[in-house]
């Protein structure tokens, strides 16, 4: 009786083990490649899957893991597993030395983003997929950098990333891998080259500063000359306007004097018309009198000669006296 119970327990346990071995639950975004007696049989999808125990076996593959060690160092570990991750993965490759076209040795490390799209090819078309991708990336990076000079390498990261992405995607296509993008993290030239570059940058900054100072001085002189020009123009315009106003004032004064003299002559003419005296004769006589006054003024003894023709003019003085008496 006890032997029968023990045998039943053993059979039940073996059945559980067999059933458990034949049931595979695959998480989302993962898969398994199943071999039957050493040959490819199927690819398990996410969810509940059934296989033949001890006949069907998941294929073992290698994965690459980067772990942080003590002291901030990183350690790359290669592990064997049956799980194939279908999500996008990133490989952080260690720095490597590459030589540019102008023979400058530079350290570069890159990031590779890829995704397994065909698990069967990723398992059977290449041995140790992570190692193969790393070596392919390193050699491709050397080839691309070798076609560029150092200055182009430092300023053309997008171009390098695009070229590497195309090369790696084409090479890994037969492995069932899709390379989505490649990113260069650090480009570190030698210390001597960095010092030379810093000196060159400093010289370039000094040159730009001198150019800016020269441009500023040039603009300052131009503005100063334009200001002086405008000032001189304004002064000339002011002098011109002052001369015009002065000329207009003098002309106006002459006109007013002429009008006043004309009015005086008119009134004198009206006054002397009553004495039957020629107004012109009167005016000439007055002019002669003024002239004689100026000629005889002063302390020096003077001899004045009067033309004979002036006697007829001065004869009108008597009539003028009568005019003033009236």
Image: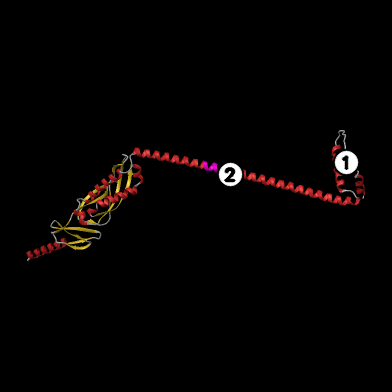
Q: Quadrant of residue 192?
A: top left
Of all residues shown, which one is farthest toward the top? Answer: 301
- Could you say which is closer to the camera, residue 191 or residue 277? 277
Q: Secondary structure at mark 1?
A: helix
Is 102 located above or below residue 173 in the figure?
above
Span shown in magenta: 218-228
Q: Earlier in the sequence, mark 2 or mark 1?
A: 2
The answer to whether 17 appears left or right of 223 in the picture is: left
Q: Main secondary structure of the magenta part?
A: helix
* Quadrant hosting residue 197: top left
Point out residue 224 in the picture as x, y percentages from the top left corner.
56, 42
The nearer-to-camera label among 2 and 1 is: 1
| Residue 296 percent coordinates (x, y) | 86, 37
Q: Which residue appears at 90% of the width and 43% of the height?
A: 312
Q: Position of residue 111 (x, y in %)?
A: 30, 49
Residue occupying the point 30% across, 44% down: 145
Q: Residues within 10 Å of mark 1 (few under 14, many from 20)?
A: few
In the drawing, what numbered circle is on residue 310?
1
Foreground of the two, 32 or 148: 148
Marks counted in the figure total 2
> Hey, which residue is sitting farthest bottom in the picture?
1
Q: Is 70 included in the stretch rendered in magenta? A: no
Relative vertical location of residue 130 with respect to residue 11 in this rendering, above or below:
above
Q: Is 259 located above or below residue 16 in the figure?
A: above
The mark found on residue 227 in the picture is: 2
Dot label at residue 156 = none
Relative to 152, does residue 176 appear above or below in the rendering?
Answer: below
Q: Position of residue 37 (x, y in %)?
A: 12, 57
Q: Secondary structure at mark 2?
A: helix
Q: Could you tell whether 283 is left or right of 122 in the image?
A: right
């Amino acid at each position: 009786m006890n032997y029968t119970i023990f045998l039943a327990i053993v059979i039940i346990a073996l059945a559980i083990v067999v059933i458990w071995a034949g049931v595979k639950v695959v998480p989302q975004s993962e898969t398994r490649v199943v071999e039957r007696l050493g040959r490819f049989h199927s690819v398990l999808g996410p969810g509940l899957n059934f296989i033949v125990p001890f006949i069907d076996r998941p294929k073992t593959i290698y994965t690459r893991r980067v772990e942080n060690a003590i002291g901030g160092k990183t350690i790359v570990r290669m592990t064997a597993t049956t799980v194939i991750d279908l999500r996008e993965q990133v490989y952080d490759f260690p720095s490597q030395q590459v030589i540019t076209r102008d023979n400058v040795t530079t350290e570069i490390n890159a990031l590779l983003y890829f995704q397994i799209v065909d698990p069967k090819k990723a398992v059977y078309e290449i041995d140790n997929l992570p190692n193969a991708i790393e070596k392919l990336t390193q050699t491709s990076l050397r080839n691309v950098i070798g076609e560029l000079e150092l200055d182009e390498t430092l300023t053309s990261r997008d171009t390098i990333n695009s070229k590497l992405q195309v090369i790696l995607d084409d090479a890994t296509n037969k492995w069932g891998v899709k390379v989505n993008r490649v990113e260069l993290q650090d480009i570190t030239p030698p210390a001597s080259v960095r010092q030379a570059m810093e000196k060159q940058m400093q010289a370039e900054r000094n040159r730009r500063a001198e150019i800016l100072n020269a441009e500023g001085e040039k603009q300052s002189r131009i503005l100063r000359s334009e200001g002086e020009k405008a000032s001189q123009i304004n002064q000339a315009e002011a002098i011109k306007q002052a001369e015009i106003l002065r000329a207009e004032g003098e002309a106006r004064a002459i006109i007013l004097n002429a009008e006043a003299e004309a009015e005086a002559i008119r009134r004198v003419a009206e006054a002397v018309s009553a004495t039957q005296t020629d107004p012109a004769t009167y005016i000439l006589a007055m002019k002669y009198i003024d002239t004689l006054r100026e000629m005889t003024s002063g302390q020096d003894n003077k001899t004045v000669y009067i033309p004979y023709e002036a006697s007829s003019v001065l004869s009108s003085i008597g009539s003028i006296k009568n005019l003033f008496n009236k």
